[in-house]
Image (tube, rainbow, N blue to C red):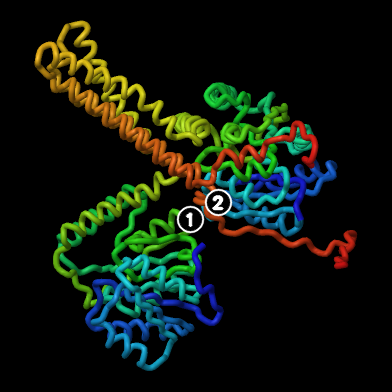
Amino acid sequence: MKESAGADATVEISAIIPVGKRHATDLLALYAEYESALDALGVTYEVIVVLDGPRPELAADVQRLLGSGARASIAVIGLTRRFGEATALVAGFQRARGRTIVTLPAYHQIRGGEIGKLVRALGVVDLAIGRRWPRVGGRFEALRRNLFHHMLASVTGQRLHDLGCGARAMKRRVLEEITLYGDQHRFLPVLASRNGFKIMEIEVQQSPLDRYEGGYELREYVRRALDICTVFFLVRFTKKPLRFFGMVGVSTFLVGAVLVAGLAIDRLAFGHPLADRPALLLSSLLVVLGMQLFALGLLGELVIFTHAREIKDYQIEEVVRYPAQKLPEEPRAVERTL
Amino acid sequence: MPLDLSIVVPLFNEEESVRPLHAAIVAGVEPLAVSFEIVLVDDGSRDGTARVADEIARADPRVCLVKFRRNYGQTPAMAAGIAEARGEIIVTMDGDLQNDPADIGRLLGKIDEGNDIVVGWRHRRQDKLWTRKVPSRIANALIARVTGVPIRDNGCSLKAYRASLIKRIPLYSEMHRFIPAMASIAGPRIAEIRVRHHARAFGHSKYGLSRIYKVLLDLMVIKTVASFTARPMLWFAMLSLPMLAIAGLALGWTCFNFAATGKISLSIAGTGVIFLTSTVMLLAAGAFGELIYELGDVREHQFSALTQRLLLASGRHP
């Protein structure tokens, strides 16, 4: 379990706003919108803004934010370099005292008024994810989004629709138990549901200011694809590397071995000299590749085996031990110090 | 205050069995005059198991309940129960009343004789012949053969362990079938006794040898990991020897042929180079393995301390 400030009975909701590279130009207006929505909930709350990396252009805004009417407790945390949104989130969480954690995007994604919906959903589930619906935007963008979520669904078996939406509400335990790093904040719902938390998508109204900011760079696509691979391994094979590497390795090895056998028969029975068979190269490559993959799987198993006691593959919800009631027949031992 | 005995029972959808199980354990263990606790592990049951177990824990302070949020499987359930247990001896058993808690006394007797692990053998097993008993017989023969731990019934959950030993054995994935084999890295004394086995009274079987390929893969992992965990370099070097031999043959033939005829066959020279590369990669993997072992917390010398006995001492040794 991570270090954190610990829950504080006086604070109901902690709202964390990680500010990354992309953020609203009118941060103050956005903040005001969130603030009025949180006020409307009628519970005590705190706001934690985490600046991911130095943001000199925001210094003036931050000053005004801190100086403005202190209706709620607000904290601004600055990270020394760009760590990624997930790390910013964790940094914010370490200061959070609320029983409920709400994460909010640093740019206009949803109408502020929809936060209440997410928080109320926590009566039934552990993690409520905003889904901007109905959604404005181009068809290409919708296609891209669908493709991403379909690929993810084929890996995790769970169809989600808007992991790009940063507005989420969750019980404190979710972030206490899940380790996030890099860009994993996007996949928090997937990881949470893998840890046995109940998650649900809630339809929220998209902000009229939410605009698709031009095409993504190619690098962004590559990154998403790698993210999906990472999630695939996290969800399916982290605890049994040999199942995956072993299967791929053994099948590669077998294909290669069959080819080699074919070549050998050809040589022995029909006298085709091996020296002018390029297929020999292919088959020996396959055999060797199979061996290497298998060796990787074994190394993975060795990691798991020697660290199994640290990396538990289960999460305990609670341990119930009722203290012994005062039993009349058992006399209380009197402790004495000499 | 350390206890003498912890009884760890994983439960998965066993609502009806929990109460009779608790009664049977208490009836079986109380006459032994040992201090004990019962660790019930609710493996994410969807029926009322957790509620019933909670009521039992409330009524009987010797009962501890570990709750999972979702179903993780029998091995993690056992691992969690074992981690939570405070007894010096840990007995694991199934939650379906097929094991008889009256046998626990005999298990403890065997531990007192100096064994580290005592395994139950369901010698008159009350299960279906073709779907359960025959596959199990084959699997057990295979496991015994491969791991070299001659146990006739790995699937029987009723086992007793010294806590100091079992708490150090890595338990994960679906390894609960192979705990004695896993533990064999520590060189424990293992005994096997016949235990009673009852037909299922409630519900139906939830865990089984469902997928044979998983068992085979797990078996392979255990075999390699358990026997070579301390010397990965050696193991990978052995693996690379045939590769090196092939590389030597192909490259030798190439040199010989070149000397004789002045021609080089690309296929054969290439094959030699590929296998040579592979040899180097495997050796590198072995070196990596050494690093991993060095950083891990499964060390042979720790295990030897757990199972060693003082055979002869004289002079100043206490």
Under mark 2, the amino acid is Gly
Task: Farthest residue to the front: give it.
Answer: B315
Asked whether the viewer can see residue A216, the reply is yes
Q: Which amino acid lies under the numbered mark 1 shown in the image of this protein? A: Gly
**Residue located 49% across and 69% down the image:** A172
Chain identifier of the residue bearing label 1 in the image: A
Quarter of the image where one finds residue A222: bottom left
Give the class, few, some or many, for how many residues have Cα within 10 Å of label 2's Cα (few <14, many ≥20): many
Q: Which residue is mark 1?
A: A196
For image coordinates 44% across by 77% down, the residue present is: A14
Q: Would residue B230 appear left or right of A268 to someone viewing this image?
A: right
Distance between mark 2 and mark 1 Cα atoms: 9 Å
Asked if disc 2 and disc 1 are in contact, CB closer than 8 Å, the reply is yes
Q: Name the element at disc 2.
A: loop
**Residue B15 location in percent, x, y?**
64, 48
Give the number of callouts.
2
Q: Position of residue A191 (x, y in %)?
A: 41, 56
Considering the image in quadrants, where does the C terminus of chain A appear? bottom right
Name the foreground residue: A304 vs B199.
A304
* Residue identified by numbered label 2: B44
In front of the other: A39 or B17 = A39
